[in-house]
Amino acid sequence: MQWALELISHWQWVYLVAGITCLAVLVVAKRAWWPLIPSLVLAATFFVQSGTLDRSTEPVGARPVLQVATANLNFDTTDFSGLVGWLVSGEAPDVVFLQEFTGQAQQALQSPEVAQRYPHRVEAPQPDQFGLAILSRYPLSEVQKVEPADMQATLRLRATVTWAGGPVRLSAIHPMPPLSATYAQLRDQALVEETHHLSQSGGLALMAGDFNTTPWAKGLLAIDSQLRRASGLAGSWPNAFGWLSVLPLDHVLASRGWQLVDSGHGPDLGSDHRPVAVRLVAR
C-alpha cells in the first residue's frame, strides 16, 4: 500500500497544474468551488519535499566554483555526438556522472578532445541500463566499484576528487525503478547506505545520478538531514522536445559544507532524460 501511495506522490507537477487550472475555470465560470477541495489538497502536497541546499548569498568573487552534472544517456543510444559536443564545450562541467553507460558510450568518449578535458575517470560500462561512469577534470582517488549483491541491486561507484586543495567524496548511483515494492525498498536502502558512506568523513561530499525517485518521496526525505538537493524541482524525465519534462528523477545531492550558486539543465543529448547541472562553492 505504501509503495502504491508513493507512486502517486511523484506526479506533483501534474497535480499542481491541474489544481490551478480547475480553480481558474471555476472562478471564470462562477461555479461552486467546493468540489475542487480534493484537487487543491493534492496540489498543496507539492510543498512537502526534501530539503534544498542553501544558496550562496554573497558574490562568488575569487572563490573556486565546482560545476557538477549528471546525465542518463539511455542505453539504446548509438549517437553520442551531443554528449561529446557538450563535454568539449565551454559549458562542460568539472565533474560529470553518467548513467546507462555502455561500451559504445565509453568508446565515443575516447576522442582526444574529451580525453584531454577529462583525464581522470571511473568507468564501468554494461550492456544494460545500469552501467556508470564518473568523468573529472581533477584527480580521482580511492576508487571503489560496489558490485550488486544480487540481481535486484545495481552497481554503485565511489571515488574522491581532489578539488581546491582538498578532498570531495563522490558517490554515483542508479537504482532500479520502483516497479515493485521490493525495488522501491532497495532503492531507498541504497540511498541511505551511500549517504552513510559519504557522511563518515564529515567533509565535502556529493551524490548524483538517476535516483528513480522524486523530492516528494520518502527516499530523499529520509536523507536530507545529511545531503541536500542542489538540483531543483524542474523535471528531467521524460525528455519531450528537448525542453519539457515532468518528473525530477535526476539529482545532485550535496553535503552541508556546500552552497549553491545556480542549477539548471544541460543540453539535449538525445536521451529520454535531460542532464541536470549545478554550480557549487564551499562554505
Image (tube, grey):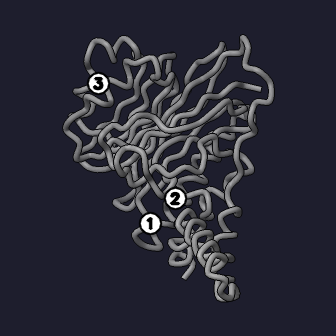
Residue labelled with disc 1: 178
Q: Is residue 134 above or below residue 249?
A: above
Please state which amino acid type lies under the numbered disc 3. Answer: Leu
| Disc 3: which residue | 109
Q: What whole-number distance in Å separates the C-alpha atoms at marks 3 and 1?
A: 31 Å
Return the x and y of residue 244 as percentages of the image width and height. Answer: 43, 50
List x then y, in percent, for residue 41.
68, 77
Q: CA–CA distance between discs 2 and 1?
A: 8 Å
Reading the image, the residue beneath label 2 is 213
Give the residue displayed 42% in from the left and 53% down from the top: 237
| Residue kind at label 2, given as amino acid type | Thr
Look at the numbered disc 2 and give the secondary structure of its residue: loop
Sort mark 2 into few (<14), some (14-19) or many (20+) by Cα contacts within 10 Å: many
Local crowd at mark 3 within 10 Å, few (<14), some, or many (≥20)? some
**Residue 23 falls left or right of residue 5:** right
Residue drawn at (26%, 39%), measured in percent from left and top? Answer: 102
Q: What kind of element bears circle 3?
A: loop
- Does 237 sit above or below residue 206? below
Q: Are marks 2 and 1 in contact (CB under 8 Å)?
A: yes
Q: Is residue 32 left or right of residue 240?
A: right
Q: Which secondary structure, mark 1?
A: loop
Q: Which quadrant holds residue 207? A: top right
Q: Nearer the viewer, residue 257 or 229?
A: 229
